[in-house]
Image (cartoon, rainbow, N blue to C red):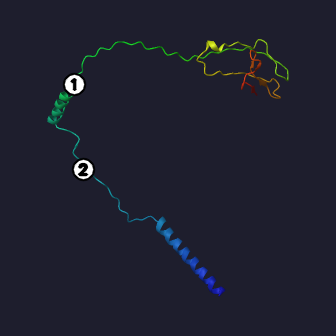
């Protein structure tokens, strides 16, 4: 019995390999009996054109259907001026420190009255930090002296 099962498996493998070989030959060989077909079309009459008599009748019908433009008096109206977006740069000064705690830098302060800028939408805090030794991190933040607390989300570091 085991001999019969082994011969059936060998026979099936032979059939599969023969089928794959046949398909490879059919798919990958170039067929020389293919015919090239060329299509030649004759120019057709332009069916979208209209004779001169037809266009004259169309123009006549349009002139009857379209009312003549009446004289309309237009009075000038004042256009309100749109305020231009402006960008203000407020330098806060500069300073140095060797402290490992937050320290106020004298001369690096400004008072900004937000009432003077009613349409303000965004304030950006830009800073340049330099560590001469390159060791460690540098931190800076804005401090609101009027309210006596840090300005939220103003802390930056290198």
Q: Secondary structure at mark 2?
A: loop
**Disc 2: CA contacts within 10 A as few (<14), some (14-19) or many (>=20):** few
For the residue pair 30 and 60, the one nearer the viewer reads as: 60
**On-image quarter of the N terminus:** bottom right
Q: Residue furthest left?
A: 53
Q: Is residue 74 left or right of residue 62?
A: right
Q: Position of residue 66 (x, y in %)?
A: 22, 27
User: What residue is shown at x 65% (from left), y 86% (from top)?
Assistant: 3
For the residue pair 145 and 8, the one nearer the viewer reads as: 145
Q: Position of residue 120 (x, y in %)?
A: 60, 18
Residues under labels 2 and 1: Cα distance? 45 Å
Question: Residues at badges 2 and 1 in contact (C-beta under 8 Å)?
Answer: no
**On-image quarter of the C terminus:** top right
Q: Residue furthest bottom?
A: 1
Circle 1 is placed at which residue position?
Answer: 67
Q: Is residue 2 left or right of residue 77?
A: right
């Amino acid at each position: 019995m085991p001999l019969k099962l082994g011969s059936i498996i060998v026979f099936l493998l032979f059939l599969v390999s023969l089928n794959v070989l046949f398909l490879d030959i059919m798919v990958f060989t170039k067929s020389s009996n293919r015919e090239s077909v060329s299509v030649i079309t004759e120019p057709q009459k332009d069916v979208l054109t209209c004779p001169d008599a037809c266009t004259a009748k169309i123009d006549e019908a349009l002139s009857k259907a379209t009312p003549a433009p009446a004289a309309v008096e237009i009075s000038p109206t004042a256009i309100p001026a749109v305020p231009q977006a402006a960008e203000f740069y407020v330098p806060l000064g500069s300073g140095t420190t060797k402290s490992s705690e937050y320290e106020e830098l004298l001369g690096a302060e400004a008072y900004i009255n937000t009432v003077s800028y009613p349409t303000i939408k965004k304030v950006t805090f830009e800073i340049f930090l330099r560590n001469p030794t390159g060791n460690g991190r540098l931190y800076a933040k804005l401090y609101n002296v009027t309210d006596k607390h840090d300005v939220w989300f103003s802390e930056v570091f290198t």
